[in-house]
Image (cartoon, rainbow, N blue to C red):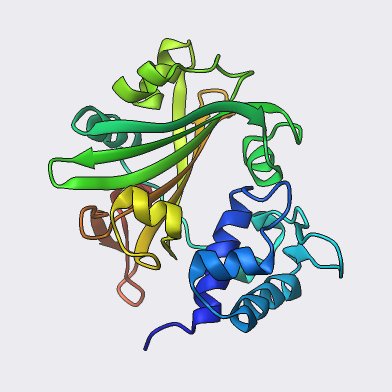
């Protein structure tokens, strides 16, 4: 059963709010009507849902603005499941070396509130935001947005970003990359993402959020990746562990703790 139009607009706007893309305020209702090709009542219903969740503030005669509520401040029941990935960092570097990259953006700017919280830096701390589209021979695979604090590494050039995975650039800058936390969920493609990934607006995408730490447990990179599910697969190796009355499937890394 297809999602109601208002809910699709709501999901797209919520995703952008979580990424800190509306620091100066959301577009007006008519701009959203034009962008998403829906009726004004649909936009109003989507905005009403965002306001009800405390993600935006709406006042007559004034622009609609984000409240600055970060994802981790929402009820725990909404938090997505997390899984540790064996060999995650090595696989990411390997994939980066086997694909081509088009750099869409490489700018330094104050960190939006959700990014600052994830990276454990002061709100407004300087970061480099890079947006890249990674492709295989079949075409676009992913659209990756990364934030790296300038206190961790100097801004990378567009040339470097096009040629090397950011993990390698961090290591070249003297950062000892340690571990990663990754969350995988789903989202819908907005107009810009759809154009970059060559999919219709509203297409389902895999959404990956990844926080990279150095060997001192300092966050050094916050990443939001959008992947075409027809060109990207997520695979885990599971083992069955536990007593005879309660066996469960867990990743190999967790299974090692039971032996």
Residue 176 shown left or right of residue 63 in the figure:
left
Residue 218 shown left or right of residue 242 in the figure:
right
Res 41 quadrant in image = bottom right
- Point out the residue furthest to the left here: 137
Residue 42 percent across, percent down from the top left: 59, 81
Q: How many labels does the image show?
A: 0
Asked if residue 220 is positioned above or below residue 141 in the image, the reply reads above
Res 220 quadrant in image = top right
Asked if residue 63 is positioned above or below residue 153 in the image, the reply reads below
Q: Indicate the quadrant containing the N terminus: top left, top right, bottom left or bottom right.
A: bottom left
Answer whether residue 172 is visible to the viewer in this image: yes
- Point out the residue furthest to the bottom here: 1
Residue in view at x 36 percent, y 61 percent: 205
Residue 41 shown left or right of residue 122 in the figure:
left
Residue 229 percent across, percent down from the top left: 27, 60
Residue in view at x 24 percent, y 53 percent: 232
Q: Which of 60 and 227 is in front in this view?
A: 60
Residue in view at x 32 percent, y 32 percent: 102
Q: Which of 222 and 13 is in front in this view?
A: 13
Answer whether residue 79 is visible to the viewer in this image: no
Res 73 quadrant in image = bottom right
Residue in view at x 36 percent, y 74 percent: 246
Q: Which of 119 and 126 is in front in this view?
A: 126
Asked if residue 174 is positioned above or below residue 252 in the image, the reply reads above
Q: Nearer the viewer, residue 40 or 116?
A: 40
Residue 21 percent across, percent down from the top left: 62, 48
């Amino acid at each position: 059963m297809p999602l109601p139009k208002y809910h699709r607009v709501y999901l797209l706007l919520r995703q952008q709010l979580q990424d800190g893309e509306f620091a100066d305020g959301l577009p007006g209702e008519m701009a959203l009507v034009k962008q998403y090709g829906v009726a004004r009542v649909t936009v109003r219903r989507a905005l009403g849902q965002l306001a009800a969740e405390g993600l935006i503030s709406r006042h007559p005669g004034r622009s609609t603005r984000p409240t600055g509520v970060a994802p981790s401040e929402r009820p725990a029941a909404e938090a997505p499941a997390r899984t540790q990935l064996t060999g995650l960092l090595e696989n990411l570097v390997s994939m980066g070396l086997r694909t081509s990259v088009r750099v869409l953006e490489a700018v330094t700017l104050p960190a939006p509130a959700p990014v600052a919280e994830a990276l454990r830096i002061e709100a407004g701390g300087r970061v480099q935001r890079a947006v890249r589209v990674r492709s295989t021979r079949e075409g676009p695979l992913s659209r990756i947005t990364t934030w790296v604090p300038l206190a961790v590494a100097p801004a990378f050039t567009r040339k470097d970003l096009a040629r090397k995975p950011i993990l390698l650039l961090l290591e070249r800058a003297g950062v000892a990359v340690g571990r990663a936390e990754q969350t995988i969920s789903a989202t819908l493609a907005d107009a810009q993402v759809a154009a970059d990934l060559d999919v219709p607006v509203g297409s389902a995408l895999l959404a990956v959020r990844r926080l990279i730490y150095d060997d001192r447990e300092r966050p050094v990179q916050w990443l939001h990746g959008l992947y075409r599910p027809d060109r990207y697969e997520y695979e885990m190796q599971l083992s069955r562990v536990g007593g005879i009355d309660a066996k469960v499937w867990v990743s190999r890394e967790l299974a090692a703790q039971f032996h």
